């Protein structure tokens, strides 16, 4: 029983501590340069600023693919340079690619990073349930004595 | 033996060390996961991209880097020294070891309960930190854990790490004169491979074997086989031998 209480207590403390740690970590933006195709695992949701540059008149396709839902978040045929923004709704892997024969570079920058609603619900849920369980166990034990 | 394990798992001192390890490891895993993004190269149709993403999210499951290993080794050494050495220092052991059970059985049950505690204190926060960050991609996590065979390999990875740390500390605890020496000795020995950057001893060898198995093999069974193949000698054989020596020593050495 003490082991269970220890596990629950550690879960509650860890859940509380997670928030300030994340707040510090998420101030840093993520920036990457993509030449052809690249998967990026982001640890939070956020806004992506995309900018691609190519010679005047070059036609190519820009694509951002969400592996979780299996759908493209952004798919666009572009001529010349392109600037755009995409919302990343959840953490996890995304696939950025430029489809072309001629050299095109894409700069990816994730700004405004924040935990998604699902993740927050999981944290509140797990932390809350363990806190309640711990409280219930303590209450029952206190009554017996 | 069961009563002994139960007793050790309920011991408040052990549980304080357990809570320390759990929270510190959890925080370290979490900040390690939030601070960096992982980049991987793939090309091909969408199905290839999805399966490759699942593999890569499996590879981001928290493992033991330098920071994490420090806390892990410290927790393990503390737990084992408390269980195996502290009771001998405080003379409590005289009443425990005078029970009608063999000495090695008492030591073995103490080592087993240390393993259980250390395993729980590392696997639970690892999954908790992972879910607290990537919990919003349930399909990919499910794929990574079951289709790509990460769950079995990952649990095996932790089991090996725990076995190594506990056996080494148990051997040192059996050899050393008191708790302080046992603690210092086991931390030093656990830390030496890290400082000297020895790739042929844990934690590096187990970590390398895991990474290699999951990046070069395609089928879950091949991956587990490759992982075991790469880490068998130092990850399983060496700890079992050390634990065996510790058990033999416990029969020879008087409880004092």
Image: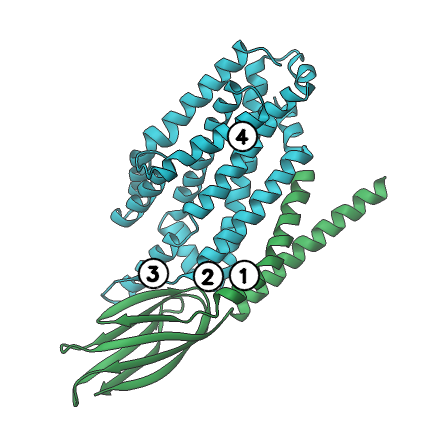
Q: Is residue A58 above or below residue A115?
A: below
Residue assigned mark 2: B34
Question: Element type at marker 1?
Answer: helix
Q: Quadrant of residue B87?
A: top right
Contact? badges 1 and 3 (CB < 8 Å): no
Residue assigned mark 1: A21
Q: Quadrant of residue B44?
A: bottom left
User: The chain coloured green carries which letter?
Assistant: A
Q: CA distance from mark 2 to mark 1?
A: 9 Å
- Chain designation of label 3: B
Name the tint of chain B in the rendering: cyan
Q: CA distance from mark 1 to mark 4?
A: 30 Å
For the point 45% across and 47% down, the residue is B67
Q: Quadrant of the N terminus of chain A?
A: top right
N-terminal label among 4 and 2: 2
Q: Position of residue B184 (x, y in %)?
A: 51, 30
Res. B183 mark: 4
- Chain designation of label 2: B
Q: Position of residue A103 (x, y in %)?
A: 16, 77
Q: CA distance from mark 2 to mark 3?
A: 18 Å
Q: CA distance from mark 4 to mark 3?
A: 42 Å
Residue assigned mark 3: B53
Number of other residues with Cα within 10 Å of mark 2, as a class: few under 14, some 14 to 19, many 20 or more: many
For the point 36% across and 73% down, the residue is A71
- Chain designation of label 1: A
Question: Element type at marker 3?
Answer: helix
Number of other residues with Cα within 10 Å of mark 4, as a class: few under 14, some 14 to 19, many 20 or more: many
Contact? badges 4 and 2 (CB < 8 Å): no
Which residue is nearer to you in this view: A43 or B53? A43
């Amino acid at each position: 029983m003490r082991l269970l209480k220890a596990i629950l207590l550690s879960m509650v403390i860890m859940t509380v501590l997670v928030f300030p740690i994340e707040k510090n970590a998420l101030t840093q933006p993520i920036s990457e340069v993509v030449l052809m195709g690249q998967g990026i695992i982001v640890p939070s949701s956020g806004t992506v600023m995309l900018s691609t540059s190519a010679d005047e008149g070059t036609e190519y396709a820009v694509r951002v693919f969400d592996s979780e839902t299996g759908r493209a978040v952004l798919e666009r045929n572009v001529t010349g340079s392109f600037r755009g923004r995409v919302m990343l709704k959840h953490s996890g892997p995304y696939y950025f690619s430029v489809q072309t024969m001629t050299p095109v570079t894409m700069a990816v920058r994730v700004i405004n990073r924040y935990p998604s609603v699902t993740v927050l619900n999981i944290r509140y849920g797990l932390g809350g349930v363990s806190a309640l369980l711990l409280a219930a166990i303590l209450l029952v034990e206190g009554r017996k004595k | 033996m069961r009563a002994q394990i139960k007793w050790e798992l309920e011991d408040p001192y052990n549980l304080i060390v357990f809570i320390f390890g759990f929270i510190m490891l959890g925080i370290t895993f979490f900040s390690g996961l939030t601070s960096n993004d992982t980049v991987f190269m793939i090309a091909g149709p969408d199905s290839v991209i999805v399966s490759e993403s699942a593999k890569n999210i499996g590879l981001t499951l928290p493992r033991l880097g330098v920071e994490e290993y420090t806390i892990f080794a410290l927790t393990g050494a503390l737990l084992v020294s408390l269980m195996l050495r502290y009771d001998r220092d405080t003379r409590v052991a005289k009443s425990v070891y005078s029970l009608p059970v063999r000495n090695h059985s008492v030591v073995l049950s103490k080592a087993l309960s240390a393993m259980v505690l250390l395993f729980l204190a590392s696997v639970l926060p690892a999954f908790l930190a992972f879910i607290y960050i990537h919990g919003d991609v349930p399909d990919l996590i499910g794929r990574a854990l079951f289709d790509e065979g990460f769950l079995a390999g990952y649990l095996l990875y932790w089991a090996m790490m725990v076995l190594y740390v506990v056996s080494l500390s148990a051997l040192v605890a059996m050899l050393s004169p008191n708790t302080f020496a046992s603690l210092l000795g086991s931390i030093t020995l656990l830390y030496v491979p890290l400082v000297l950057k020895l790739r042929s001893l844990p934690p590096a060898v187990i970590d390398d074997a895991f990474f290699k198995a999951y990046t070069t093999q395609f089928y879950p069974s091949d991956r587990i086989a490759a992982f075991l193949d790469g880490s068998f000698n130092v990850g399983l054989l060496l700890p079992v031998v050390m634990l065996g020596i510790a058990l033999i020593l416990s029969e020879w050495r008087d409880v004092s």
